[in-house]
Structure formats: C-alpha cells, structure tokens
Image (tube, grey):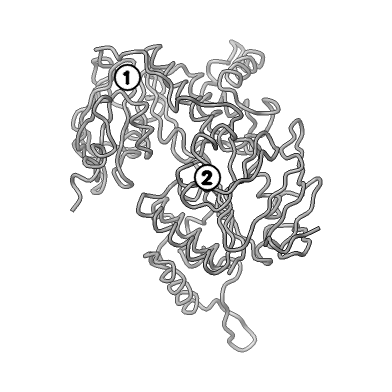
Amino acid sequence: MSNNEFILEMIKISKEFPGVKALEEVTLQVRPGTVHALMGENGAGKSTLMKCLFGLYKPDAGEIFLNGEKVEFQNAKEALDHGISMIHQELHCNLFRNVMENIWLGRFPLKKFGPFKFIDDRKMYRDTKELLQNLNIDIDPRAIVGRLSVSRIQSIEIAKAVSYDSKVIIMDEPTSSLTENEVEHLFTIIQDLKKRGVAIIYISHKIEEILRIADEVTILRDGKKVGVWPAAELTNELIISRMVGRDLTHRFPPRENKPSQEVILRVEGLTSPLFRSFKEVSFDLHRGEILGIGGLVGAQRTELIEALFGLRSIASGKIYYKGEEVKIDSPIKAKKMGMALLTEERRATGIFPVLDVLENTSIANLQKYVKPNKLLDEKKRRAEGKRAVQMLSIKTPSLRTLIQDLSGGNQQKVLFARWLLTEPEILLLDEPTRGIDVGAKYEIYSIMTDLAKQGKSIIFISSEMPELIGMADRIMVMCEGRLSGFVSGEEATQENIMRLATQFMA
C-alpha cells in the first residue's frame, strides 16, 4: 500500500543473479523536495536497486510506487517518460557529437517542410542555451563533447537529466570528477531543484558531502537495508560503522617502513610536445617510496604519468631507471621495465566489460602462462587468478563472472590484481580509490603500504587531499603543467598543498 507522504516508494525489492543475492527485500521511501542519500560499501546493492527503479533490471520481487501509483518500467525510456532520470557514475555521452545533440538525443525538435520533417538546429541551440544558462553552466552548445574535460561532461549529464523535467533524479557519484568550485555549483543546482519539489536520490562515498547535502540517509549492507536516518542525526563514524558493520578506528593504515635512499626513477626536465601540457618536470622516486601527486583539474598530472608509461610522446627531458637513461616510447617497454599503470577512467580505459574476471585479471600477464607448445596453461592461470581474487577480497560469484556485472569497487580491485600479477617495480596509480567505498579504500591503502614495505615504489595521483596527506611519504604538487613544489609527509597540510596547487594561476 502506498503512502502519499512519499513521491517514490520501492517496497521489499529483491533481485538475484547467478550465485549472488544482490538485493533482499529492500525498501526505499523518498519524499518530494528532499535529497535522500543512498550509501553502502561497493557490492552493497545501491546500483542494482537504482537499476531496478530505472527499468534496467526487472526485480524478482517487490513493488514500486510513483506519486502513489504502482509502476513497472520495462526500460529506461519508460522511466524517463514517467519523470525519473539518472546520472550514471560512468558517463555515457557520445564523444563525437556536440553538446546540444547529446542533451536532446532521441527527442530532437523538428520542423516541417511540406511532407518532410527536419531537425530544427536553431530551436535546439536556443533551448540548450537557455537550459545551460538556467543552471549557470558556461559551455558552448555546439562544442564537441570529446574535446571537453570530464568535469564538463559531468555537467552536461546533469543538464540532460534536468531537461526531462524529472520529479526524481538519481545522481550516482555526481562529484567524482568535479573540482571544488564545480561541486559547490552542483550543490546550488540541487538546492534549486529541491525548491521546485524535485526529489534527489544521491549516491556517494564522500561522507562529508552526504552530511552536508542530504536530508535523509538509507544505508545498505550486503544487499539488505540496514536502516534509514535523518542526516542531522548521523556522524562520520556512525555512517562508517553502519556501512561496514564494524568500527574503522583509523582511516589510513600505519606507515611503518621508510623509503630507502636508492633512487629507482629519476626524471629530468620532462616536457610534452603539446603547448598546454606538462613542461620542465623533474623529480626522483626512491625505492619503497609512496610519492603522491597533487593539483587541481588541468594540472596535467594524468598526462605526466601517461608519458612515463609510454602512452604520450615527450618533446624533451630524460628518464633514468635504476641509474641508466631509458627511452620509454610504448607501454610494452614500460611494462618490460617493471612499470604498471592503473588508469583513472575505469570504464573507458581499464576493464574489458564483455570478458570475465579471470580474463581481465590475467590479460596483462598472458606471456607468463604460455607453455612450450604455445598453449595457455589454464591451470596455472586459474590458480593465480583465484589467488589474486582472495588477496584483494574481490566479491565475485566466480572467476567466470563478467566483470561488467561486478560493482565499481570490485572492478577497480580486479584492475589492481591485473597489475600486481605482473610483479611490477613501479606502480603508477591514477585516482586509485575513485568511486570506492571507505572499507574498500582501506584495503587499497593497505595493499599500497604492503607493496612499499616490499620495496616497490608507487606514484599515485589523488584529488582528495586527506588521501595524499594520509598515504604519501612526499607530495609533488603541480599547477597548470608545471612542478610547483614538494611537501614532505610531516609538513603536509591542505593549506600547503592548495597554496602550491594555485601557484602559477593568474
């Protein structure tokens, strides 16, 4: 029975996949004009629940009520037509089309010429301009999406959701690619939507955001509802303990080892051939050191480590590995030298979605499993895949489960396992905990710490300053492609990092 107090009710929703019960009688009730946060560890069932709401999955049991009426969506279009839109964590824009075409895809305004209909580009431009202006988003409607930054693409996705005049908007990790100013802008948009009576279902692992923006919080654990609370009654510690079912007394593991004096990697004056990219960057990386790279969006941190891995060309500068000058002009060379790269965009440049967990885990190390007769040693490959899954506590029904069926956090851990099996000397990690819950983050931190103890060297990029401060032995800060300074672990504060991160800005 529906309650008129709520704009949306999902009553006792259950969903099962082969080998795993993703949801077990989960109830979610959302009031109009509120932000209802949905929290839980990776694999808790948050995305599955939202996919059941959005028509991407059909629940095995349970009922959904919208504005007091029972609904059963067969696909996403039906959900959109009923006023429910979803901003996915992994962006789904067509990178080869312009902004306005992405926003109005499937519902282009038309004009008639006799018996024929054509797309009305002028009207589409005007409507897009008005929509973006109302949201204070400064993007040219005719700009090609693939040429925009990830944060601007995220803004387009938000505008597209608003354009449906939706009464319920699902936001899945909406700030994962946004700068601090853009996050503030998003929160302003959310407050405006609340005033219009729009309900926001907000999924995020950033507890500080939840406590600031949410009215109510529902927490899931292992596919079951733990409970629902007013956000004002919750604290950081309470949310964590209810999410993971245990107390996490420390956010970061203790750092017990000290980096050696041996320099394993030396970079001198590295410069990109591109005008707006990194230039004259020099640094040393010691054996057993965790070197963090901080900076704002546009600091060219990703471009720098991709160049170190041979994915980008270098105009000038030198790289020394174990004291010898090397030329890294391809990822194959970097991998043979003992380097590994975990990319920022898991979906675009990390996973092979149509392959299973075993294939995704072993694909960077296939040569190791080739027998003298040129066939793969399946027994050895499966054994190492199983060991990696156990080592990283990856939640998967089996090694033959498609990686696209795992939660985002477990997908990330599979990618981590992929590179650990290559036994690298240097790990290049680009936002390694992006979109991962607090419990899984601690597991990744522990792996990083253990690797450093073993004498492995790590360079990692993070946009979360507490993460840099908590994990790095030293922090290298970049601003607009240039190295602006180093901060030692003992002297690291958010103020010191931010001062260096804005050093060269006009």
Give how far across and how far down residue 151 sits, in percent.
41, 52
Say which mark, if any, is on residue 289: 1
Closer to the camera in the image, 11 or 318: 11
Q: What residue sits right under mark 2 in the picture?
A: 204
- The three-letter code of the residue at mark 2 reads Ser
Give how far across and how far down residue 433 sits, in percent.
46, 34
* Residue that protrudes farthest toward the front in the picture: 233
In the visual, does 345 lie left or right of 329?
right
Closer to the camera in the image, 475 or 375: 475
Q: Residue at x 28, y 18 (%)?
A: 286
Locate the N terminus and report the quarter of the image it occupies.
bottom right
Give above or below for 129 relative to 259.
Answer: below
Q: Nearer the viewer, mark 2 or mark 1?
A: 2
Give how far across and how far down residue 69 sits, in percent.
77, 64
**Which mark sits nearer the N-terminus, 2 or 1?**
2
- The three-letter code of the residue at mark 1 reads Glu
Give above or below for 445 relative to 102.
Answer: above
Which element carries disc 1, helix, strand or loop? Answer: loop
